[in-house]
Amino acid sequence: MLLVIVVSVLPTVVLLIVSYLQAIAYAKGNLEGIIKLATIKTDRLLEDADAILHRSKVDLQNANTQTSVKILQRQIYNDFRFREAGIINTKGLLTLSSLGVMNAPVPISPIKAQFDPRNPDLQILGLGRTQIMQEKSIVLMLQGSGKISSIYLLVDPVVLTNFLEAIPDLDLGSNGFIAYVASDERLLSGIGSLPPNIYSGLQNPSFKTLQVTQSTRNGRITIVGELGRKWVLRYWLQQLIVGVPLSVFISGVLIYLLIRQIRKVNTLDYELRRGLAQKEFEIYYQPIIDLDTRQCVGSEALLRWHHPERGLLNPGLFIPIAEETGLIVPMTEWLLKKVIQDRAILEPLFPYLYTSVNLSPTQLNIGDVDRLIQILKEANNHEKAQITFEITENKLVEEQLQVVQDAIARLKLWGARFAIDDFGTGYSNIAYLQSLNIDQLKLDQLFIKGLEYGNQIPQLVDSLIDFGDRVGLTIVAEGIETELQYQYLKTRRVRYGQGWLFSRALPFAEFEQFLQTQAR
């Protein structure tokens, strides 16, 4: 019962987990896309800044004061991303900028990081301001030469984040943010609820948040995106409020249906045992016809169940349960006994008839055929019993080859023959089938029905027939329903066939009458 509940609830649990993971993956994917775009734009900004500063460094080598101002102005006016450009002398003071000449050199303040005059690469000094440009800006510096210690560019921090305003429906929630952090842990720019110590959050991300980071190509700036997990799951939680009661209801229905089905199976198991004891089963015989003469040469014994409440039941309903519960073994033994009794009645007039009996592959796979041998042994004239056991190809176990071979050999000692039922629908290899000492191959009715449709099925049927002929096996075609199918198989020299074209499965009395009618 616990297993039933688990199986019923499991789909709901799996659905909730999958939807949870999808919500997280969707939010993370969107955030990764934004951070990637931010990284690309920042890389481009730093590359352009580096190019401007290097170009200015060359142009300023021999320029006078007024020319230097014009050179810097030309660089700034051509690119709105940069607020100001200027020259720092060897004493670390600003002497002139794109906004004009300083009457007295002044420092750029406040900048926590110090410029390294030995580093030839572009340096990011953090946020600072000049005497003229009072708004805080990101200071970018490049090593100079001669009297010029360094050249700087001021970048409006908003330049890094203004593209985010163009992203439709961007919502970081109450605790989310996107931040630009320098390599020395300084915050350069950002939007959202920026925490006081972003760098510690990078080193120890919380489970309560969803975090994405990516660095620029030179590693000087890291862009951090973070969303509150609760915010990411807000729609999922809303759906959960509605979905959980509905899922519980569906699970309850599934539990009820499964319990009902289990009780039904258990009931059917009990009824099968009772049916065997009370002789509720009956054998129907479907004639097997010689396709050349259209005369009956045998029959297939098919089990029917006269259920006291449900009426006549076909084997498709109860045989799988009998296989699962092990009742198939006593049912097969009862069937074989009854077939031998019926044959005893027919044998005086129709001694040439053979009867096919379906044998559970389970019995062959474990070699449990002692009772069947005993039944054949007790039958009168067992050498003339002409019993053919049909076994289904797709249920044979190749790993039990020796056991199956021994079981078949033992039954053959008492006059039995063997046929592979539903041939062509299983997965057994040819060598395996040839090793079983089989006498007949029964072509599955699906192939026979397909003879009237397309070109591939007839070719497949021809190949199966050719295989049977090559290995010396008798071919029996099942499910012949039309004259066209019959004529096709006859021209291919298929020896035997059965199907509604000749006769449906008949109770013993009607089968006996069918034989007598043919004999006239």
Image: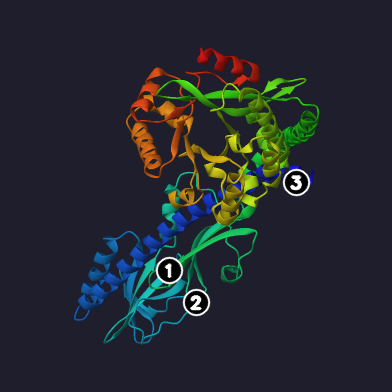
Q: Report which quarter residue 330 is drawn in.
A: top right
Q: Is residue 29 above or below residue 470?
A: below
Residue 227, position as x, y percentages in the image: 58, 56
- Tell which circle, 2 or 1, labels the residue nearer the N-terminal end: 1
Q: Is residue 237 above or below residue 515?
A: below
Dot 1: few (<14), some (14–19), or many (≥20) neighbours within 10 Å? many
What residue lies at 38% left-to-right and 70% top-to-bottom? 217
Front-most of residues 483 and 349: 349
Front-most of residues 415 and 160: 415
Q: Is residue 285 above or below residue 8?
A: above
Residue 489, position as x, y percentages in the image: 38, 27
Dot 2: few (<14), some (14–19), or many (≥20) neighbours within 10 Å? few
Which quadrant is home to the N terminus?
top right
What residue lies at 60% left-to-right and 36% top-to-bottom? 358
- Tell which circle, 3 or 2, labels the residue nearer the N-terminal end: 3
Q: Calculate the distance from the C-alpha at mark 1 to the C-alpha at mark 3.
A: 64 Å
Residue 77, position as x, y percentages in the image: 28, 61
Q: Calculate the distance from the C-alpha at mark 3 to the C-alpha at mark 2.
A: 57 Å
Q: Is residue 359 visible?
A: yes
Disc number for residue 138 = 1
Q: Is residue 247 visible?
A: no
Decide if residue 445 is on the left or right side of residue 252.
left
Front-most of residues 200 and 357: 357
Mark 3: amino acid: Leu
Residue beneath label 3, please?
A: 3
Dot 3: few (<14), some (14–19), or many (≥20) neighbours within 10 Å? few
Q: Are dots 1 and 3 in contact, CB under 8 Å? A: no
Mark 2: amino acid: Asp
Q: Which color scheme does this rendered protein use?
A: rainbow
Mark 1: amino acid: Ile
Could you say whether the residue bearing mark 2 is in a helix, strand or loop?
Answer: loop
Disc number for residue 184 = 2
